Image (cartoon, rainbow, N blue to C red):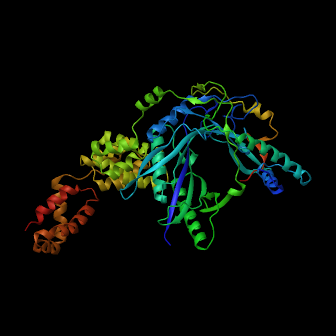
C-alpha cells in the first residue's frame, strides 16, 4: 500500500502535526516503506496464535479499596505553569 | 413512509468505591478542586496504576445481575486522545477483552408487555477530569478530582425501537446498579451518563440506517427529548432527499437543541493497544461464585416479592421496586402502618406528586417513611379521614410543622366518630333538603345510590371535613329509609 500527498495531509490533520509541503513527498515515501514492511508481516499466518496482552506470565495484583493518598495540591500546583482557584489553567479548549 | 427508530445505548456508571480505580485518592463528590487528584491521577512520570479490587467486584456484580457472561480473564487497553482533562493522554479502558458480557436484560413497558435487550458487553474504565470553560483570562480551568473515578460502561445491541424502550432500559440499569449498591445513581451529579446511538429505517427493513451518537445525557428527561429531536431530524433529512452523516452530537438540555460535535471524517483514531502498565486481570471462579451467592435482592425479585408478600398489583410493584430508595421507603412505611396497599397508594400518588411539585428526590423528602406510616395508621384507626390527611396533615408534615399526632391535636383535625354528634349533623342537613329527601324516597332502590352523594357532600362540608365518612354514610342511609 502506498500513500499519496493527500493521504499524508489527512494523516497530519488527524495526528495534529504540521507537515510542511516541502517534505511531504519524502514523508509519503517513508511511510509507504513502513506500510510495505507491515504488508510483509501480514503475509505470515497467525491464525493459530493467540493475541498476547502482555509478555509476562503473570496476572494483575489487586489493591484493597482504601484511601491512601492525602491532598498534595499545593506541591503539585507549585510546578504547574498556571493555576487559579485550585484549578490547573490550560489554553482554552472548546469541544 | 413509515419509519422505524433503532436505538442502542452506551451507559457510563460511576462505581461508588471509596478510592479511585488505579490510585488511592478519594472519589468523594464535591471536594475542593484537585484536592483528590494524586500523582497517579495527574500522570506524573514514574507512577504506575494498581487496580482497585472493589471496582472489579462491582463489575462482576453487575454482570451477574444482568445474566451476563463473566470473563475470568480481561485486559485493559489504552484509548489514546488528547484533551487537557485526561492527563495521561490516554484513557485506561477495556476493548477486546472486557470483564463482562454478553448478557440480556428484560425490560417492562408501560402497556405491560416486556422485551429483551441484549448487552453487547460491559467494561471497566476510568473517568476523565472536568474542564471549566468559564473565563479564566481566556484559559480553561481543569479539575482532576474526577480523573480516575471507576466506571463501568454498559454497551447494548441496537435492540430498542422507541424512546420509551430506551428509557425503560436506562431506568432498569439505574434500578439494578442502585439495588446492587455499586453506584449512588445520582444522575444530576453525573453518576450515570447515557450516550444514545440512533438511526432510522423504513418500517419492515432489516438493514440498519446510518447512526448518530448523542452524548452525555444525564437525565431520563434529556434522553427522551434528545431522542425525539434526533429522530425527527433524521426523518426530515431523509425525506428531503438528504443523507444522514455518521457523527457525534451534543444535546443541550437547556435549549432543547443539538449540534454536531464531530463527524466520522475527523473522528479520532484512538490507537487502542493493551496497556503495558497493567497485567491481564484474572478472577477465580470461586470468587465469582462467592459474589453470586451474596448478591442483594434485585429489582425484579423485589417486584415479585411485593406482589406475593404485599398483594400489590404488577404495575405498582414494578413502580415501587424500580428504585431502591423508593422500595426501601415503601417497606419502611409498611413496617410502621402494616397496610401495604394504602402505603403504595400514598407513595405513588400523594408523595410522588409532592416530590414532583417541589422538584426534589426521595432521598431529600422531608416526610420520613416512619411519619407517613404514622399518618396512614391514623387513617386506618379512624382518627382522621383520608381527605384531611391529604389536605391538612401531609402538607404540614412536609413543612416540618410537627409530628402526626401533634398536628392532629393542634389543628383539631380529629375525625368526628361520635355517633350522636353525627346524627345531629345529618338531621340538620336533611332538614334543609326536604325536597331532595322526598325525591330520594320516590326513587327506586337501585338508583338511590347515585343520589346519596348529594347529601354526603353538604354533610362533610358542614363538619369541616372531619366527619367519619363511613359512619355518616351509614347514618344517612338509615335516616333516608322511608
Residue B263 visible from this viewpoint:
no
Residue extending farthest to the right is A22
Residue A54 visible from this viewpoint:
yes
Q: Position of residue B220 (x, y in %)?
A: 51, 54
Q: Position of residue A43 (x, y in %)?
A: 70, 41
Relative to the observer, which residue lies in front, A39 or A26?
Answer: A39
Q: Position of residue B181 (x, y in %)?
A: 47, 37
User: Image height check: is B423 above or below B51?
Assistant: below
Left or right position of B468 against B244: left
Relative to the observer, which residue lies in front, B249 or A1?
Answer: A1
Relative to the observer, which residue lies in front, B98 or B126?
Answer: B98
Q: Position of residue B358 (x, y in %)?
A: 48, 54
Relative to the observer, which residue lies in front, B322 or B74?
Answer: B74
User: Image height check: is B273 above or below B389?
Assistant: above
Q: Residue at x 72, y 38 (%)?
A: B88
Left or right position of B360 against B329: right
Left or right position of B402 against B124: left
* Numbered circles on residues, count: 0
Q: Residue at x 46, y 26 (%)?
A: B286
Amino acid at each position: 500500500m502506498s500513500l499519496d500527498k493527500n493521504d499524508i495531509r489527512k494523516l497530519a490533520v488527524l495526528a495534529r502535526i504540521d507537515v510542511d509541503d516541502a517534505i511531504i513527498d519524502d514523508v509519503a515515501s517513508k511511510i509507504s516503506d513502513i506500510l510495505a514492511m507491515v504488508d510483509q508481516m501480514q503475509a505470515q499466518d497467525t491464525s493459530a496464535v493467540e493475541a498476547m496482552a502482555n509478555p509476562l506470565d503473570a496476572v494483575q495484583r489487586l489493591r484493597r479499596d482504601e484511601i491512601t493518598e492525602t491532598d498534595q495540591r499545593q506541591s503539585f500546583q507549585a510546578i504547574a505553569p498556571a493555576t487559579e482557584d485550585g484549578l490547573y489553567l490550560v489554553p482554552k479548549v472548546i469541544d | 413512509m413509515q419509519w422505524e427508530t433503532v436505538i442502542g445505548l452506551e451507559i457510563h456508571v460511576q462505581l461508588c468505591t471509596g478510592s479511585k480505580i488505579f490510585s488511592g485518592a478519594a472519589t468523594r463528590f464535591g471536594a475542593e478542586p484537585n484536592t483528590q487528584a494524586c500523582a497517579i491521577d495527574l500522570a506524573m512520570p514514574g507512577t504506575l496504576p494498581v487496580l482497585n479490587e472493589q471496582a472489579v467486584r462491582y463489575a462482576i456484580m453487575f454482570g451477574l445481575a444482568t445474566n451476563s457472561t463473566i470473563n475470568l480473564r480481561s485486559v485493559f487497553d489504552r484509548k489514546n486522545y488528547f484533551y487537557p482533562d485526561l492527563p495521561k493522554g490516554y484513557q485506561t479502558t477495556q476493548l477486546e477483552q472486557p470483564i463482562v458480557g454478553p448478557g440480556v436484560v428484560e425490560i417492562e413497558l408501560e402497556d405491560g408487555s416486556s422485551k429483551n435487550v441484549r448487552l453487547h458487553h460491559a467494561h471497566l474504565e476510568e473517568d476523565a477530569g472536568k474542564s471549566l470553560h468559564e473565563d479564566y483570562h481566556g484559559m480553561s480551568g481543569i479539575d482532576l478530582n474526577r480523573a480516575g473515578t471507576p466506571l463501568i460502561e454498559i454497551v447494548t445491541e441496537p435492540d430498542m425501537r422507541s424512546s420509551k424502550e430506551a428509557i425503560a432500559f436506562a431506568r432498569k440499569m439505574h434500578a439494578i446498579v442502585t439495588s446492587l449498591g455499586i453506584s449512588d445513581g445520582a444522575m444530576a451529579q453525573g453518576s450515570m451518563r447515557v450516550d444514545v446511538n440512533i438511526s432510522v429505517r423504513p418500517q419492515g427493513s432489516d438493514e440498519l440506517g446510518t447512526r448518530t451518537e448523542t452524548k452525555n445525557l444525564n437525565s431520563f428527561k434529556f434522553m427522551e427529548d434528545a431522542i425525539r429531536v434526533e429522530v425527527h431530524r433524521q426523518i426530515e433529512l431523509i425525506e428531503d432527499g438528504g443523507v444522514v452523516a455518521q457523527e457525534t452530537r451534543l444535546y443541550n438540555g437547556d435549549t432543547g437543541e443539538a449540534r454536531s460535535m464531530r463527524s466520522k471524517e475527523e473522528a479520532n483514531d484512538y490507537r487502542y493497544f493493551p496497556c503495558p502498565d497493567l497485567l491481564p486481570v484474572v478472577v477465580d471462579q470461586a470468587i465469582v461464585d462467592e459474589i453470586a451467592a451474596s448478591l442483594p435482592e434485585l429489582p425484579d425479585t423485589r417486584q415479585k416479592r411485593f406482589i406475593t408478600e404485599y398483594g400489590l398489583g404488577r404495575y405498582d410493584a414494578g413502580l415501587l421496586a424500580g428504585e431502591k430508595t423508593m422500595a426501601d421507603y415503601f417497606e419502611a412505611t409498611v413496617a410502621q402502618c402494616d397496610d401495604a396497599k394504602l402505603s403504595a397508594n400514598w407513595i405513588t400518588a400523594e408523595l410522588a406528586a409532592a416530590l414532583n411539585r417541589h422538584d426534589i428526590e426521595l432521598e431529600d423528602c422531608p416526610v420520613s417513611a416512619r411519619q407517613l406510616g404514622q399518618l396512614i395508621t391514623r387513617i386506618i384507626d379512624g382518627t382522621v379521614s383520608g381527605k384531611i390527611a391529604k389536605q391538612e396533615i401531609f402538607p404540614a408534615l412536609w413543612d416540618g410543622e410537627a409530628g402526626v399526632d401533634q398536628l392532629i391535636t393542634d389543628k383539631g383535625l380529629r375525625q368526628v366518630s361520635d355517633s350522636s354528634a353525627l346524627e345531629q349533623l345529618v338531621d340538620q342537613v336533611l332538614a334543609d333538603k326536604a325536597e331532595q329527601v322526598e325525591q330520594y324516597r320516590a326513587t327506586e332502590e337501585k338508583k338511590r345510590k347515585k343520589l346519596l352523594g348529594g347529601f354526603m357532600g353538604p354533610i362533610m362540608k358542614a363538619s369541616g371535613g372531619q366527619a367519619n365518612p363511613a359512619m355518616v354514610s351509614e347514618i344517612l342511609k338509615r335516616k333516608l329509609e322511608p
